[in-house]
Amino acid sequence: MRTIRGISSAEAFGSAELTFSGAIVNLSGASIDNDVGDTDGPHAGLITLTGATGLSEGGLVVEIGGVAALDLTILDDTSCTFRPPALSAGLHDIDVTNTYGGDTLPAAYRAWSPALIASATVQGYYDARKDVTGTSPITGWTNQVDAEDLVQEGSGAALVADYFGTGVPAVHFTGVGAFARPSSLRHTNANGTTRFWVGEHTETALETTQYNPRMTAIGEQLGSVYQGAGMRGPMLEYGIYTSGWQRQTRGYYLNDGQPRLMGFTHSSAGSLRGYVDGEQIGDEMRTDGYTSVPYPGASAGWSAIGVGYPGAADYLIGHYGAFVVCDDVIDATERGYLTKWARLSFGTVAKPAETALDFSPRAAWVQGNYVNAGTGQWPNRTLPQIFPSYTEAQGRADQGGSPGPAAVGGAPDSEYDTDWPLTSSIILGDCVQSVGHHMLVAVSLESIATTSTNRFENHSWLKDASSYSCIYVWNNGGSYYAGIYCWDGAQKYAEVDVTALLSGGGAGDLIIVGKREAGTLSVRARRGDGTGDTGWVAGNASGAPSALSGVISALGDPTRTPDGITRASMIWNYPLSSYESDAAMAWAEGLFP
């Protein structure tokens, strides 16, 4: 509805003609970007109105639900920014007027709170803006949905004023005795669970001390532990116990100090998904590439915020604004409300853009064990997914010793002894076939011979008691093939012709990626400069390729390696999303001189 401020021409001028010197506000083509905010506020984020006209005519007023918006800033005649005031829950009109008149966006803004989630039972909603007792340390934190308040233990988490924005504080978890937990016994999540938190951190720590995520956001402190949600360095991590422990990870470079809404949903039917800013990260998590992750039913639950089992273990680190826990999985509509609410409340941002993904050791790691095929395992070692920076900085000391990649067959290339050899074997004891996997190698090849002792190379290699995988390149009478090989009770492989990507003798820079997803193997390759991409080639050919047939036991043997340099050898313990895979290949291009 448009209104005009003024008086009738007859009243002002008799029969004279009435004229206007300016334009009234017109919102016919206008919209706002953030349309869900907290009922109480305050808000760190801004609402941006675009597509209007008449905003710079003077006397601009913006009202939401009849209440003046806060911090109004006119950008130009078509756009402005503002923050919403405290409002009753529900939809509200946005009225925009200037000196000459105004217009309305009907039912354009929703005042909302996680306490209003209706598609699942909200058990815990803790907000740094609401009912926090004490500052340093915090002595209590009120649950916004029931009487299950938090009490402070340990050395004390502190409240940091204005951390996310004016009037929007954060709870600072230090990782050493700083946590808060519900004051009574655990909540059960028999119907599934939703666990989200808002916060930021810059930690790179990876190793867990107990059964929890490395930095537990929502976990278990009392009794037996069956599940926990949190982070491991740059990734999200979820731990679950049914017949045994499983850990699932998702995401990259989430430790960049940017505030984000992060978390998981896990249905009673076994559907486990990770989210950043409301967007699902990667595929649905599965136990073996195609089977859902079993849910522990009535044994599932939580009793702690910022710490894992059995207390004083795997503390949360960083600054956090809110935690939301539900029994059952919230629906897509309310997950969307939660995402928009977090953006306005705490200024959260989206996952890192593809071009911003960093696959250096700080950003891309995976938990596992070095395994020596002859003498056993060295437990509790954390392997980098990317070798160049890591090995050149500190891994050289492992050459010829143990534990380390060299202990499983790797040895310095005689010609390029300052680089890891093409057999830079990575052997992981616990994450091969559990959720499928993704592998990348970047290599500078000098030659690929056709002799019986030098027919293939093994760049990346995963193995557990009953399965293993590797990426290989081989010379088939002058034609060159790159492939991924997998054995998990039966031999399978997929390969692609890379002859056109290499020069005579098999020389050239190659980036090769392979994956196992839902039981299907696929491989893809391109030159080191990004040209000649083959695209994904799927295949589950039975048996082994000629390059590997009869010599599986020699995988990792440096005598079967062509001359060249490994620029990177990376392993993920789940299939990457398409954008993550593309970003990893683009990143690998920068490894070549």
Image: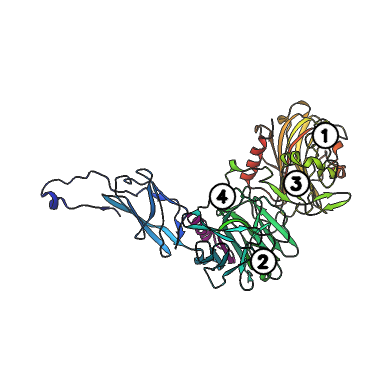
Q: Is residue 345 left or right of residue 568?
A: left
Is 197 above or below relative to 374? below
Residue extending farthest left: 14
Distance between the alpha carbons at the discs numbered 3 and 1: 32 Å
Q: Which residues are magenta?
A: 322-346
Percent from the top left, x then y, of residue 488?
Answer: 79, 52
Query: Pointer 3: what residue?
Result: 540
Q: Earlier in the sequence, mark 1 or mark 2?
A: 2
Distance between the alpha carbons at the discs numbered 4 and 2: 26 Å
Query: Pointer 4: what residue?
Result: 258
Q: Earlier in the sequence, mark 3 or mark 1?
A: 1
Looking at the rendering, which quadrant does residue 195 occupy? bottom right
Query: Pointer 1: what residue?
Result: 413
Question: Which of pointers 3 and 2 indicates the residue nearer the eye?
Answer: 2
Query: Pointer 2: what residue?
Result: 220
* Label 4 environment density (alpha carbons within 10 Å; few <14, some 14–19, many ≥20): some
Disc 2 is placed on an element classified as loop
Residue placed most toward the observer, 559 or 256: 256
Distance between the alpha carbons at the discs numbered 1 and 2: 48 Å
Main SS category, magenta section? helix
Residue placed most toward the observer, 380 or 278: 380
Percent from the top left, x then y, of residue 231?
Answer: 65, 55
Residue extending farthest top: 504
Q: Earlier in the sequence, mark 3 or mark 4?
A: 4
